[in-house]
Image (cartoon, helix red, strand yellow):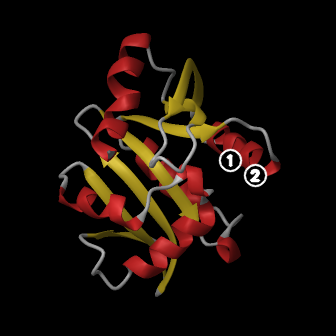
């Protein structure tokens, strides 16, 4: 399994990764293609195809900052779930030695509970800070999240500096 960084929406892998992204997240938790386009120009931003053999099986969206990695989205194609792919990808990021920060929706339904448990199995810890992601657009709703991090919980200062940083860049 390998990651391939995409540099624009013109990359041949982009349409498949976008389909996986759309299938993996509800509308309120994802950006539009137009919102995503300018992100490619930002040096901290990565949109990567997760490839097994010759097949694109997932997408990883991260922000790589000097002190931390912000995992914005990770999605695995439905037919490839529960095979350890997402775990291997996130474990690689966690093993990089940087603080890893991510979001998990409140565990209100089965899918959200599974995602939260998945992060927990990897050692990502829930932080005691409330965070509501502003809507991506006027027709979308804000989304309350649990901020998760590894190798430890964030201090309040780190949360203030870290958690919103990627969101500020994402707008």
Q: Say which quarter of the image contains residue 132.
A: top right
The dot on residue 111 is: 2
Which residue lies at the image location 27% right of the left edge and 56% below the top edge?
39
Rendering coords of residue 95 (x, y %): 42, 43
Q: CA distance from mark 1 to mark 2?
A: 6 Å
Answer whether labels 1 and 2 touch (C-beta < 8 Å): yes
Which element carries disc 1, helix, strand or loop? helix
**Residue 36: image x %, image y %?**
34, 60
Considering only vertical position in the picture, is 164 above or below 141? above
Q: Give x and y (percent) for residue 99.
A: 39, 32
Q: Which residue is mark 1?
A: 115
Q: Residue at x 62, y 41 (%)?
A: 119
The residue at the point 26 percent across, 39 percent down is 65
The crowding category of the residue bearing disc 1, from other C-alpha atoms within 10 Å (few below 14, some 14 to 19, many at least 20), is some
The label shown at residue 171 is none
Residue at image x 47%, y 36%?
134
Question: Can you see residue 97?
Answer: no
């Amino acid at each position: 399994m390998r990651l391939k960084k995409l540099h624009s929406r013109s990359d041949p892998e982009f349409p498949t990764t976008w389909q996986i992204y759309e299938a993996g997240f509800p509308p309120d938790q994802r950006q539009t293609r137009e919102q995503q386009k300018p992100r490619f120009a930002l040096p901290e931003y990565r949109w990567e195809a997760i490839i097994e053999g010759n097949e694109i099986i997932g997408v990883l969206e991260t922000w790589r900052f000097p002190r931390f990695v912000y995992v914005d989205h990770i999605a695995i194609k439905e037919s490839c779930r529960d095979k350890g792919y997402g775990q291997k990808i996130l474990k690689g990021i966690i093993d990089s030695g940087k603080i890893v920060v991510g979001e998990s929706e409140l565990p209100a339904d089965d899918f959200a509970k599974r995602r939260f448990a998945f992060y927990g199995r990897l050692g990502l810890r829930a932080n005691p800070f409330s965070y509501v992601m502003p809507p991506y657009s006027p027709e979308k709703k804000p989304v309350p999240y649990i901020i998760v991090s590894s190798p430890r919980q964030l201090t309040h200062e780190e949360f203030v500096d870290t958690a919103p940083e990627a969101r500020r860049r994402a707008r």
